[in-house]
Image (cartoon, rainbow, N blue to C red):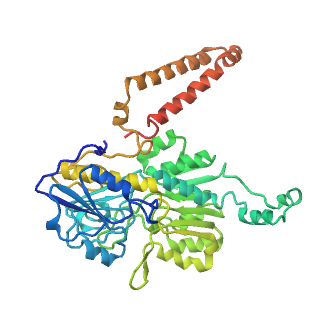
């Protein structure tokens, strides 16, 4: 199912009602004429739907125009206390967030939408915290919006150290005219990515995109995921590992994409915290690379320090939130424990402030627009797209939506095919079938003739079929 994405018709709002939405993250990352991030694309989307955009905090609600959804753009809100002060009294009916962590004490009686896949930062009790379980408001996300951006950044992190050619050193020497290719190039042997093994933990939208890119580089891809994904993982040509430690065995790279999991109400600990620990790291090939562009808590930092000490891990790329208190300068967030490794292993670390997926302008704009559409659906139709956790009584969950080519193939994808699409696929398959049948039935002595006459046609048909399935979003697990 898809959210209502029409920007042509004004959404019908009860003329006596007023709805308020806080946007607490940037919705435009490209700089405008004034040198600041420009939210104009999202503002135009809101106004086309009949909403109102305010580049300010909510003041007196009684003065707002009735029959409208009002969006209040406050992207600089960050610290826990200032968020509670801004939204602890329920003045905003809903919120749109990306990287900002919403404390449990923030109150949004209607809904919250996270731009992106995970909802671990959506901590408000209004919907029961990041799991969306047990609250009275609706929690949603926009899965797949930044999957490709994240996957590309994962590959960027890997390519920084594999192949391990010291390009900066070579550039410096070449630029100074201090290198002789004939005599000195032999001193810099390296190995390509092709043939190396990457273990991917989790087969959601991001894990699958990483797997596809790794395969394009010729890597052997091993995936650990829920057993129900096994058939589709293997159907897509990847190796399924039923056990986490087994997946890590002899891996040259490990990339984790499973999310935090559920939070224990008593301890506050997430189910997947410390998932990548000493046993997992010890099973990788010596000198392996670890990439955690998911949640900082997923890695046991003490175990990572030990693996870096021993040379078991040669490089770790981590992307996690880091917050600074505006008044005290105190640091917090899941990146904080990794900072203790910098003094000993700074040259083996690449630490990013949760930037891998959250600094891509087109993804952020697309995610914000989708979040707005989903909120209008909740307000106008009581329909919920991309629900996380439980959907409160009175609302109808209408399923999930992802960008084209991301996520599973659904019945909707098949039902959207036109007669022309079906006819073209049938023709390609039928022609392929006849040629394969001819090769199957022919004696070995006659196969050379068939291949000589029809081989080029057969390969073109194979390529055409693959292109059609990609174009029509028919590749992937069926849901």
Tell me, yes or no, if residue 463 can be seen here.
Answer: yes
Q: Name the image quarter holding residue 333.
A: bottom left
Q: Name the image quarter holding residue 9.
A: top left
Tell me the quarter of the image containing the C terminus.
top left
Residue that protrudes farthest toward the left in the picture: 16
Front position in the image: 420 or 43: 43
Tell me the quarter of the image containing the N terminus.
top left
Front position in the image: 23 or 193: 23
Q: Residue at x 85, y 57 (%)?
A: 181
Residue 347 location, x and y as percent? 64, 72
Front position in the image: 127 or 273: 127
Q: From the viewer's perspective, tell me whether residue 49 is left or right of residue 432.
A: left
Q: Work out whether 128 lies above or below 451.
A: below
Q: Residue at x 57, y 27 (%)?
A: 462
Residue that protrudes farthest toward the bottom in the picture: 328
Q: Work out whether 169 lies above or below 385.
A: below
Circle count? 0
Tell me, yes or no, if residue 203 can be seen here.
Answer: no
Residue 381 location, x and y as percent? 19, 47
Residue 397 location, x and y as percent? 24, 48
Residue that protrudes farthest toward the front in the picture: 33
Q: From the viewer's perspective, tell me whether residue 182 is left or right of residue 337.
A: right
Q: Residue at x 51, y 41 (%)?
A: 234
Q: Work out whether 38 lies above or below 421.
A: below
Residue 424 location, x and y as percent? 46, 23
Q: Residue at x 46, y 41 (%)?
A: 232
Q: Work out whether 456 lies above or below 355.
A: above
Front position in the image: 292 or 445: 292
Q: Name the image quarter holding residue 37.
A: bottom left
């Amino acid at each position: 199912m898809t959210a209502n994405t029409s920007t042509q018709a004004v959404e019908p709002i009860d003329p006596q009602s007023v709805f308020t939405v806080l946007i607490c993250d940037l919705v435009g990352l490209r700089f405008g004429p004034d040198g600041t991030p420009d939210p104009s694309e999202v503002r135009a989307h809101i106004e086309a739907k009949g909403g109102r955009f305010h580049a300010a905090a909510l003041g007196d609600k009684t003065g707002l125009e009735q029959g409208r959804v009002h969006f209040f753009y406050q992207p600089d809100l960050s610290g826990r206390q200032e968020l509670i002060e801004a939204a602890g009294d329920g003045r905003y009916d809903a919120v749109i967030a990306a990287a900002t962590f919403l404390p449990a004490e923030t109150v949004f009686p209607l809904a919250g939408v996270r731009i992106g896949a995970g909802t671990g930062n959506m901590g408000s009790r209004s919907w029961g915290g990041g799991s969306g379980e047990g609250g009275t408001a609706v929690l949603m996300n926009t899965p797949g919006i930044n999957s490709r951006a994240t996957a590309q950044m994962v590959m960027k992190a890997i390519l920084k150290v594999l192949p391990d050619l010291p390009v900066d050193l070579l550039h410096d020497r070449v630029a100074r005219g201090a290198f002789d290719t004939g005599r000195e190039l032999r001193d810099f042997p390296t190995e390509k990515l092709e043939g190396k093994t990457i273990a991917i933990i989790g087969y959601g939208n991001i894990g699958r995109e990483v797997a596809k890119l790794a395969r394009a580089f010729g890597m052997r891809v091993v995936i650990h995921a829920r057993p129900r994904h096994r058939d589709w993982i293997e159907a897509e040509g990847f190796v399924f590992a039923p056990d986490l430690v087994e997946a890590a065995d002899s891996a040259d790279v490990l990339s984790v994409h499973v999310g935090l999991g559920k939070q224990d109400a008593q301890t506050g600990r997430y189910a997947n915290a410390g998932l990548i620990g000493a046993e997992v790291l010890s099973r990788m090939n010596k000198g392996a690379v670890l990439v955690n562009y998911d949640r900082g808590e997923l890695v046991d930092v003490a175990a990572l320090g030990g693996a870096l000490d021993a040379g078991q891990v040669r490089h770790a790329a981590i992307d996690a939130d880091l917050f600074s208190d505006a008044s005290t300068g105190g640091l917090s967030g899941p990146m904080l424990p990794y900072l203790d490794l910098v003094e000993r292993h700074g040259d083996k670390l690449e630490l990013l402030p949760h930037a891998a997926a959250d600094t891509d302008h087109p993804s952020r704009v697309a995610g914000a627009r989708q979040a707005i559409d989903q909120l209008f659906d909740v307000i106008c139709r009581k329909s919920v797209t991309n629900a996380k956790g439980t959907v409160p009584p009175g609302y109808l969950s209408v399923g999930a939506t992802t960008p084209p080519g991301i996520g599973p193939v659904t019945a909707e994808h098949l039902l959207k095919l036109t007669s022309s699409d079906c006819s073209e696929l049938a023709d390609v398959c039928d022609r392929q079938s006849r040629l394969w049948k001819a090769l199957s039935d022919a004696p070995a002595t006659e196969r050379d003739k068939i291949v000589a006459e029809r081989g080029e046609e057969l390969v073109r048909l194979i390529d055409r079929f693959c292109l059609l399935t990609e174009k029509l979003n028919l590749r992937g697990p069926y849901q």
